Amino acid sequence: YFKGLLLNEDYIVLPWWRLYNYQDIIFRTFPEAERLFIRPEIGNKILTGTTLNKKWWNKEHKIKKKLPSSNIKFSDLIIISSHKEITNEYRLLMHKNNLIDYTLYEGYRQKNEETIIKKIVKNNKYFPDELYTIDATIINNDYKIIELNSGVCAGWYDMNMNKIVNYLSRFVL
């Protein structure tokens, strides 16, 4: 459904313990990247998505494991991808193929954001649930999808709550 549209299409998945013991394989997989993005393979926030610098890999790996917010086990799977610099992140609240509302919840607004948001909605052919969110970024006058989440457990941030309630009461409830 998303070929060419996912921000982190270049990725590998390894258990947490292999990040420490197999960095040579990881570095060969992403030879051009100085930093790598890591996040849990599951939606459960056992570790917040973050980056590790190749130069300080072992030290940063140990620090991430010891953070109070980290609930990671050695066997937990981690997605590793090259780091991409993004300057904005939008959250779209969707009902099937209909956009209910969207918000910029991190970064800077783009002058063409409404055109790009319409393009995301038009191109989306995958509905993981009846109500879901699409997190996306606008890069070089186009977009990349960061992730899809459940619409009922994802934050709606600064979206128009009246618009959402009116939509849901008319079309979903």
Image (spheres, rainbow, N blue to C red):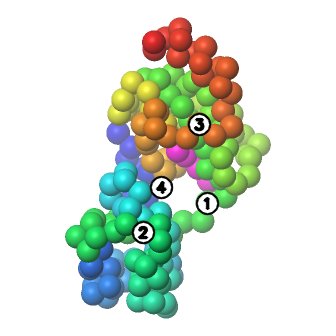
Report, in whole angstroms, how far the alpha carbon at label 3 lies from the one at label 4: 21 Å
Q: Which mark is residue 7?
A: 4
CB of mark 1 within 8 Å of CB of mark 4? yes
> In the rendered image, which residue does mark 1 sit on?
86
Q: From the image, state whether disc 3 or disc 2 is nearer to you.
A: 2
Q: Vertically, is 50 above or below 62?
A: above
> In the rendered image, which residue does mark 3 sit on?
156
CB of mark 4 within 8 Å of CB of mark 2? no
Report, in whole angstroms, how far the alpha carbon at label 1 lies from the one at label 4: 10 Å
Q: Residue furthest right?
A: 111
CB of mark 1 within 8 Å of CB of mark 3? no
Q: From the image, state whether disc 3 or disc 4 is nearer to you.
A: 3
Pick the residue in front: 165 or 109.
165
> In the rendered image, which residue does mark 2 sit on?
70
Q: Residue furthest top?
A: 170
Circle 4 sits in a helix, a strand or a loop, which is it?
loop
CB of mark 3 within 8 Å of CB of mark 4? no
The C terminus lies in quadrant? top left
Is 144 on the left or on the right of 9, as rendered? right
Residue 46's quadrant in the figure? bottom left
Residues in magenta? 135-139
Does any portion of residue 141 appear in the rendered image?
no
CB of mark 1 within 8 Å of CB of mark 2? no
Q: Position of residue 103 (x, y in %)?
A: 66, 38
Does the magenta run of residues contain 137? yes
- The numbered mark, 3 or 2, whose residue comes first in the sequence reads 2
- The numbered mark, 1 or 3, whose residue comes first in the sequence reads 1
Q: Amino acid at mark 2?
A: Ser
Q: Position of residue 94 (x, y in %)?
A: 50, 28
Q: Position of residue 160 (x, y in %)?
A: 68, 27
